[in-house]
Amino acid sequence: MTERASQRVLTGITTTGTPHLGNYVGAIRPAIKASLEPGVESFFFLADYHALIKCDDPDRIERSRLEIAATWLAAGLDTNRVTFYRQSDIPETPELTWLLTCVTAKGQMNRAHAYKAATDANLAAGEDIDANITMGLYSYPILMAADIVLFNAHRVPVGRDQVQHIEMARDVAQRFNHLFGRGKDIFVLPRAEIEEDVAMLPGLDGRKMSKSYDNTIPLFDGGAKALKEAVARIVTDSRLPGEAKDPDSSSLVTIYDAFASAEQKASMRADLRAGLGWGDAKQRVVELIESHVGPMRARYEDLMAHPEHVEDALMAGAAKARTIAQPLMHEVRQAVGLRKMVAVPGAKSSKAETTKQALPVFKQYREADGRFHFKFSAADGTLLLQGGGFTEGRESGQLIKRLKTEGIAALQGALVEVLAPLPQVEAALSALAAHDA
Ligand code: TRP
């Protein structure tokens, strides 16, 4: 493995759905922050090929890609520092996926969580084990492995549910290195990185904020009005204004904390203990979130109104990404034997100088008396036969031809002196015949 000054950090964002406040706090904001650390080279991409596994509605695919790209850009992603691209703009990714597929154990894919969950659900429902399961779902971890190793990423920040996939990527990369690396590592072995200290934002009902619980607060959708309405629906206890409240058992406070400074956190707590009403507290929450999200929303709306700017940014990102992917893929193709048809080791060569040293050789010459002679030498130069004395060059040529085709049988009655053991002569003649064949 070549040592690089910087560590490559790569992560994919599956482009399904519209980002909500929980995605921003739990994934987008920390990833952008991490990308600004010195000594890291970050790669963020829209995993739109992965999105196709879960979604066959072209309009939703299109919209989600745009919304997610615009969200990351509006949230402050710096495309000069980060390589930001779409998976589907990198043709090397599906190309590498196939080469990795050829070295991936089927049994290992049988154990992948997403596939296992689907087969378990089928069995529980009394269905065929593979009912409604596509090859896309089945091979999902191999596509993901290609995403990662194509850029020789060292670290892959992911949620817990993805750790197994990163381990599979590591395994596949290791197998590939072993099979084709010839002592050199073609791929870096990636490590999963779980963001332990990232805030997990509660939703309206206090459970984790998630689209599947239908408890989300929108990030940009619906503007300030929708934000205000969602915050109004956050569940609180029924204490009235003037009653002391427990800030530590309130998801409203947890959401506030995700945006608050230390001072703001402290005064919110003190005020709730002193009887601040939930309605007033919610007003503070809306104002605080809006102060962070408002400027981003303006950028987001501008990008959504100009998708061509998003397109340009992504195409520039793809070009940057491919300056890494193309040479690596070239190396990989070489390694597996998909090479240009030149200089193939072990095959016939048309270059005389390469055959000369390796093969026995007939040499014809003419003596001072005008007669034609020949010598036959082994590959190592040992003189094996010496013959001739023909008046016509043609006769010498014919005998050589017979020796080549008939072997030592042609020595019978010929004007030839045998200078080495016959088996040695025979071996040399057949080596020559095999070459000429
Ligand atoms: N499967 C990941 C998810 O659903 C997204 C993803 C695709 C990804 N390719 C990746 C994440 C490569 C990290 C690295 O979250």
Image (cartoon, rainbow, N blue to C red):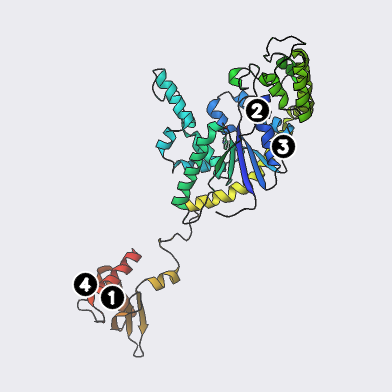
- Name the residue tied to disc 2: 23
Secondary structure type for disc 2: helix
Secondary structure type for disc 3: loop
The label shown at residue 409 is 4
Determine whether label 4 and label 2 are within 8 Å by CB. no
Secondary structure type for disc 1: helix
Q: Compared with residue 250, is residue 312 higher up or lower down, i.e. above or below?
A: below
Q: Quadrant of residue 428?
A: bottom left
Residue type at mark 4: give it.
Ala
Mark-to-mark CA distance, 4 and 2: 85 Å
Determine whether label 2 and label 3 are within 8 Å by CB. no
Who comes first in sequence, dot 1 or dot 2? Answer: 2
- Name the residue tied to disc 1: 399
Q: Residue at x 61, y 20 (%)?
A: 207
* Left/right of residue 343 with respect to residue 325 in the rendered view: left
Residue type at mark 2: give it.
Asn
Mark-to-mark CA distance, 2 and 3: 15 Å
Secondary structure type for disc 4: helix
Q: In x, y percent, where is residue 149?
A: 55, 44
Who comes first in sequence, dot 2 or dot 3? Answer: 2
* Left/right of residue 251 with respect to residue 124 in the rendered view: right
Mark 2, residues whose alpha carbon is within 10 Å: few (<14), some, or many (≥20)?
Answer: some
Is 76 in front, or is 195? Answer: 195
Residue type at mark 3: give it.
Leu
The label shown at residue 77 is 3
Mark-to-mark CA distance, 1 and 4: 11 Å
